[in-house]
Image (tube, rainbow, N blue to C red):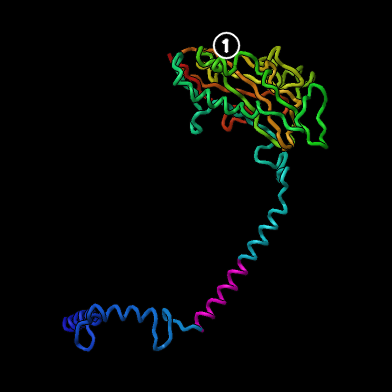
Amino acid sequence: MLPSIERTNNSAVKMAHDDDYAGGQKQSCSQKCDGIMKSIWNSDKKEFIGRTGGSWAKIGVFYLIFYSCLAGFFAIMLVGFFSTIDSEAPTQQGMYSLIKMNPGMGFRPMANVESTLIKFKVGDQSSYKDHIDNLKTSLKAYKEDRANNVIDCNARAPDVKKKEVCDFEIPTLGTECTEENDFGYKNGTPCVLLKVNKVYNWMPVPFDNETLLDQDNVHAQEAKTKLKGRMDPEYIGITCEGENEGDADNVFNVNYFPAKGFSYKYYPYLNYPHYLPPLVFVQMEVRKGALIQVWCKLWAKNIKHHKNDKAGSSHFELLVDV
């Protein structure tokens, strides 16, 4: 066995030196360069990187036809896909949509999109400057000139054929939560802007008398208890409270502007141009220095609440430092 192994090793060593030697002599640097150049272009065989001109032409035609067919197939699939899409209405609607016709709710300020914490220090303008700027940005579109299809719905109902939408008037947000008052942050009574998420063709359903009189209807009874005198059949009710008992003990007073919530006249949402959803400001007086979990809920007969995915609601944390 040993002689066999020795012969194998000797052969390997010999092969390793074959590249450096030609005719018993070691190749010079110029010879190596010539070998490399010849592997790129062989003038004797008229080959470029190992292929003749005819061979390159054949493979070029093959790939041209192959990728042309591939691109054509992809284009046909795109045309078929886009033909099923409506520029105004989503394909999946109603109970077939992901949110199942149960809208959520967004809030501002959200200076950091990765956090739901609203934190600032009373008297320190730099601590709430980002919150103020975020609220200004959110309200900017509502202060611009109205387009032709934006009308005053207090005067008449919108014309669906003309794709008219109702104008939201900033004065309905009250005089407390204004830019001049730093939206309450300088006084330690912060204002949070709430907005119902857009759900195509969704229309809120008010609680009727029969539902409110049904003592077994927990949802209706809870709405009646929490909204009290603010319940109105033409508005989506809104409440904000401490999520847990400890949080509720640290919330002293809550005011809403408009007080009744979101008017039904802005619904249904049909993706018409220049539509702006209604807004509600909630102003909270809370215990200073306490981190409070706040849960804001929408109230209508066809809005359900769920803590895990915040269906029909919005959640944020509030910390007013001193």
Single out the residue that lies furthest toward the front: 145
Residue 42 located left or right of residue 253: left
Q: Is residue 64 magenta?
A: yes
The residue lying at 46 percent from left, 14 percent from top is 122
Image location of residue 214, percent across then percent down: 75, 19
Q: Quadrant of residue 296?
A: top right
The residue lying at 78 percent from left, 36 percent from top is 163
Image location of residue 84, percent across then percent down: 72, 52
Image location of residue 62, percent across then percent down: 56, 76
Residue 320 located left or right of residue 64: left
Residue 259 located left or right of residue 191: right
Magenta range is 54-70
Q: Which quarter of the rendering shows the N terminus? A: bottom left
Q: Quadrant of residue 283?
A: top right
Location of mark 1 (residue) = 253
* Residue in the foreground of this view, choosing between 311 and 62: 62
Q: Is residue 26 magenta?
A: no
Q: What is the magenta segment's predominant secondary structure?
A: helix
* Residue in the foreground of this view, choosing between 40 and 252: 40
Image location of residue 160, percent across then percent down: 81, 35
Residue 222 in view in this figure: no
- Amino acid under label 1? Asn
